Amino acid sequence: MSDFVPTAEAHEGRDEDDYDESLVAEPPHPINWNLLTANDAEVEWLELNRWVDWLRRTYGLPAAVIPPYWHRHPELVWELSALHLHWLCAYDPNQNGSAPLGWHRDFADARLRLRDWVATSGTRLDRDRPTRQATWPGEEPPTPSEESMITDREADFVEFVVDDVQRRQAAEDEFYRSLGDPPQEEP
């Protein structure tokens, strides 16, 4: 894990309407959030957060489309991540001149899906709860979840990213430790 910790101060002095510089120094590619290393996850979270903030401000999107705690809902993360990739590709200097128009057409469809995801998830402008899951026959019912008030979105995002990166790093460390252990023979 890098020593960088995302903070609100990192955003100071930055023009939110300016999204010219990417934090990622490689060509756009699909992001599989399930397979990212700790270091890659940190970079991708920061990049996606920066772009989502730009998107919501540029297009005046309400919380019914992009709520403050979008990062706590995988269904929103996957949708926004795909939309971000599409945007990066559409606005690539080597892209066809009509690609941005295609992105805007797809953006209209994505806004409808985002509204559906937000309605399903239950996250709002001022409060959040984990997305409810349907229990299939034979499964244990989930622990009931309560809504929590959203008081500081930026602080929550920083805490979320730090926790996610630490969880991924612990899994990586455990994996590499397991490679050094001799295999156990079954009796």
Image: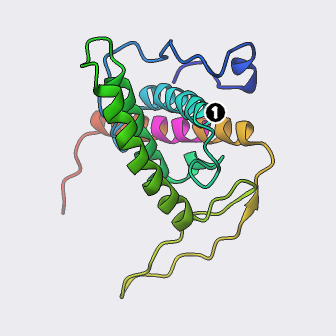
Q: Is residue 28 magenta?
A: no
Q: Which residue is mark 1?
A: 57
Query: Principal SS element in the magenta part?
Result: helix
Q: Considering the numbered disc 1 on the image, is that residue within a helix, a strand or a loop?
A: helix
Query: Which residues, given as a range, are shown in magenta?
Result: 162-169
Q: Residue furthest bottom?
A: 137
User: Closest to the observer: 38 or 60?
Assistant: 60
- Residue 28, relative to residue 139: is it above or below? above
Local packing at callout 1 (Cα closer than 10 Å; few below 14, some 14-19, many 20+) is: few
User: Closest to the observer: 68 or 89?
Assistant: 89
- Direction from residue 7 to residue 171 in the image, left or right: left
- Residue 132, relative to residue 30: is it above or below? below
**Residue 167 at x, y percent in the picture:** 51, 42
Circle count = 1
Note whether residue 140 is visible. Answer: yes
**Residue 178 at x, y percent in the picture:** 32, 40
Quadrant hosting residue 60: top right
Q: Residue at x 32, y 11 (%)?
A: 93
User: Closest to the observer: 50 or 156?
Assistant: 50
Three-letter amino acid code of the residue under disc 1: Arg
**Residue 187 at x, y percent in the picture:** 18, 63
- Direction from residue 123 to residue 111 in the image, left or right: left
Q: Residue at x 53, y 71 (%)?
A: 132
Quadrant hosting residue 71: top right
Q: Is residue 164 magenta?
A: yes
- Direction from residue 9 to residue 177 in the image, left or right: left
- Residue 31, relative to residue 62: is it above or below? above
Q: Residue at x 43, y 17 (%)?
A: 24
Q: Residue at x 42, y 46 (%)?
A: 108
- Direction from residue 22 to residue 130 in the image, left or right: right
